[in-house]
Amino acid sequence: LSIVTIGFVKTRLPEARRYYRMELRLCLDMAREAVRIAGPAEPLEAAIATGDSVLADPEADIADFEAASRALRDHVTALSSAAIGQPHQAELEAMILDKSGALLGQSRLWCAPFGFELQPENLPQPAW
């Protein structure tokens, strides 16, 4: 397991910054769409502004991208919970599932070197 992990890091480390920037861009896209569907949401809009700042910062590192992505996901989740019983609930949930599917596909592709994918040829092309 240690050898596989070292091989994974060796393979992915040169691409890591691009991957986590791509993940943040996808999270920002989902968050903006959530605001469009559900209406203004101050905490989510603040997280969007932070995510945009992180993307624009040439000195931001992987941990910054991960933290911004995590905050966006948390706020979208909170918005989804607040949408229960609201007229926009179905549209918001459908968008979250759609956008999360794209994120999941990229995550699966990112982890493909571990060898757990039964049909890695069916994974999407890298977006990073």
Image (cartoon, rainbow, N blue to C red):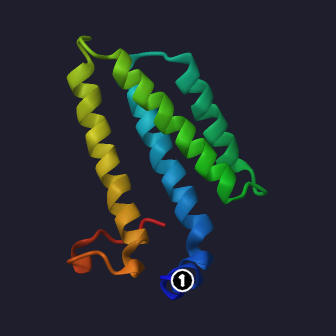
- For mark 1, give the secondary structure: helix
Q: Which residue is mark 1?
A: 2
Q: Residues within 10 Å of mark 1 (few under 14, many from 20)?
A: few
Q: Residue furthest right?
A: 59
103 versus 72 height, above or below: below
Query: Measured from the top left, where is residue 72 in percent x and y?
Result: 52, 36
Q: How many marks?
A: 1
In the depicted view, which residue is nearer to us: 40 or 3?
3
Instruction: Find the residue positioned furthest to the front.
Output: 1
x then y, percent, for residue 95? 28, 36
On screen, residue 10 above or below 102 = below
At 62% from the left edge and 51% from the top edge, which residue is drawn?
65
Q: Residue at x 23, y 26 (%)?
A: 91
Q: Among all residues in the image, which is located at the extreme top?
A: 86
Give the residue at x 62% y 41%: 51
106 shown above or below 100: below
Looking at the picture, does residue 89 appear above or below residue 8? above
Q: Nearer the viewer, residue 107 or 7?
A: 7
Tell me where residue 15 appears, x and y as whole percent.
57, 74
Residue 8 in the figure: left or right of residue 87: right
Residue at point 26% right, 11% down?
Answer: 86
Q: Amino acid at mark 1?
A: Ser
Say left or right for 62 vs 77: right
Q: Is residue 47 left or right of residue 88?
A: right
Query: Residue 63 location, x and y as percent?
Result: 67, 54
Which of these two is toward me, 128 or 86? 86
